[in-house]
Amino acid sequence: MTTTVAAPTLLRDLDEDAFGALYDTDRFTATVFSNRLRYSVQHVATGLLHRAFSPIIALAYDFAAAICGPPEQGYQMAAVTDGLTVFLGTMADGVRVAVEEYGIENLKPGDLLICNDPSRMGNHPNDVCFIRPVFRDGRTACFMVIRSHQTDVGGIAPGGFSGRKRNSYENGLVISPRLLYAGGEPVRETFSMIFDNVRLAQQLLPDLKTTQGCCELGEQLIQESIDRYGIDAFLGTLRYLCDGSAEAMRTALASIPDGDYEGVDSIDADGIDADEEYRVRIVLRKRGSRLEADFSGSSRQARTCINGGALDAKTAIGVGLKILLDPESDFTSGTFREFDLVLPAGTITTALPPEGGIFFYMEVTNLIMTVLIRALANALGEDAIGGDYGTLCHHNGYGTTPDGTPWAASAVAGGETGPWGASKAGDADGHSCSYLLNFMAPPSELLELGFPLMILRREYVPDTGGVGFNRGGPGVLKDIMWTAPAEHETTPLRFRHRPGVGVAGGADGAGGGVWIFGRDGREVGGRGIFVDTDPAVYAEAVPVAGTLDPATQVPDPAGEYAYFCSSPVWQTQPGAMWRYVTNAGGGWGDPFERDPERVKLDVRDGYVTLDGARRDFGVVIVGDPHRAPEKLEVDAAATAAERAQAKTQQRKGTV
């Protein structure tokens, strides 16, 4: 006898009575209320963005705002801004842990609860979570939440972006759940504890006050909505938002063929030595509309703070699956309902305190995204997307001004932004944030105004994007000259293997690297402050990271690995220049099927050279792309011959 399992009823198929019974309001009101809640959190985020003092919030958008439900709803995140996506999976769990540890019964109107412990909240110590309870009719209606990166929280390195920190004590101040404001008034002992342990308090103090004001604004907007539609409709809408996200992910997962899918990739090394790579191995077991992500077989936690935590792994799976399978629907806690995680403790994805520490969790989440791309490439077929540049190459520069004032440029003057991978939709973006983040590239002028540096060059590197029917984004070259004596720490963590995975027949993107020119302030290459991009100049540089040819020091997949922490702290004199070249994005589809006219435009725009067009796409372009770019022409006959020869060689290679 065959048992037939009825398909679950979709939300759109519920009649009005069934909808009202589930959500205590009608469909129209729930829809309007949903939009009001999304507007409310975005309004809060806009306020913080325009009023923050620290560059990493005001210029890089390193924060997110959310509304989380009451305890009886499991603190589920029902509405969140388009801010930093690596916060999405940690919000609800972090709020639950902080509130329950502090005691829900101890919270009062006007309170602002804070916590930053990576083991409790996910993320790293600089990412402080601010939680304001919203009360209605004597009950907790929800929580207005902001999570934002603070410029400094102590520890051994100004700003915190150092790969050499060996434990949670060196990592920075850990703030257990406690009040920053009580009944709207600042809690003196909490402020004193923070400012007794951090640098750059002149930025933190106004940012903390601004955050309090933004959370107060969020509560005001929520209360106005409840005044209009009622508490029952409000709570029902929170459930409705999360149920909608769960349904969208359930439908998306059902579209993947059942099976077991495995992916592996790695981080180059920790801050101790270059001898040990740290891999993440994931087995995805998909059955019906459910999926299990098993991290068994991943490497032990690193000896320094390049680790992530369990909530960060949860975020990476949820956001990664959403990008790959369901990019259109809203993201809420409901997105996480349809999959399970197997997370053995004490790995690079589930580090335990105090050893090693958790700081570069975003590098681990980026790695998990690459592993997902590798694991699901065949299952998704034409719907697969190529890998992105993989590592943010965070740069931490610091020093003192002539009058002794300390300064720190954290995570804003390295290789933080770069290319994506291609998809069936078209060529990839060449200059963005990584898939698992959503920050902005700070404007060069404002960086130069705030720190002793000059952005000399930011441009694409031709012939680096993964070739394909659709091309991966090219590597980004960025030159930063420092105009004052400085100390630097950098964490380019993924140059041993290329993260720009090619899919559906496309090629991997090229690898990049990091170098210092004129470390002692001397002119390099006879070009004044500008250093040429010709491969010959790299022999004069100090290699910092990359897989490089040992003689020329240019990127070479068969070369030797340059270890980013071979000098734990890099000291430079005025005039020294750091060059970052990001990894490139992966291609999609057969490059020899790409329209020759599209290749011609790539040559015109500088993404591809004349030689690269012939070698990688089988397209012969006639003309001078530098002096007469609009007069380039495709040699159709030569192109047909090149492609015919390439196909013959491909057939021979498969025999």
Image (cartoon, rainbow, N blue to C red):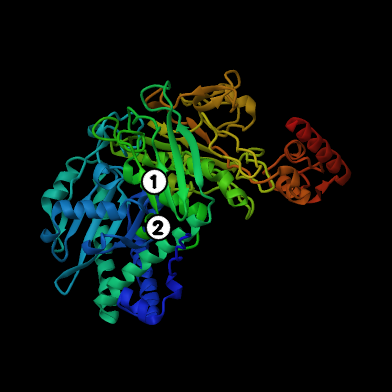
State the SS at label 2.
helix
Q: What's under tag 1, amino acid-wise?
A: Gly
Q: What label sits on residue 335 in the rendered view? A: 2
Q: Is residue 366 visible?
A: yes
Q: Could you say which is closer to the camera, residue 200 or residue 99?
A: 99
Please state the horizontal and vertical placement of residue 407, each as a whole percent of the image: 33, 39
For label 1, count other residues whose C-alpha is less than 10 Å away and answer few (under 14), some (14-19) or many (20+).
few
When the figure is inspected, residue 186 is found, relative to residue 135, above or below; the finding is above
**Left or right relative to 539: residue 224:** left
**Left or right relative to 465: residue 282:** left
Q: Quadrant of residue 572?
A: top left
Question: Which residue occupies the extreme right position in the image?
Answer: 637
Q: Could you say which is closer to the camera, residue 184 or residue 14?
A: 14
Please state the horizontal and vertical placement of residue 597, each as a whole percent of the image: 77, 51
When the figure is inspected, residue 25 is found, relative to residue 62, above or below; the finding is below
Q: What's under tag 2, amino acid-wise?
A: Thr
Q: Is residue 477 visible?
A: no
Please state the horizontal and vertical placement of residue 634, each as a whole percent of the image: 83, 47
Distance, label 2 to label 1, CA atoms, is 40 Å
Q: Quadrant of the C terminus?
A: top right
Are the residues flagged by discs 2 and 1 in contact, CB closer than 8 Å? no
Q: What label sits on residue 74 in the rendered view? A: none
Residue drawn 42% across and 33% down? Answer: 491
Residue drawn 32% across and 42% down? Answer: 310
Question: Which residue occupies the extreme front position in the image?
Answer: 1
Q: Circle 1 is placed at which residue position?
A: 450
When the figure is inspected, residue 531 is found, relative to residue 340, above or below; the finding is above
State the SS at label 1.
helix
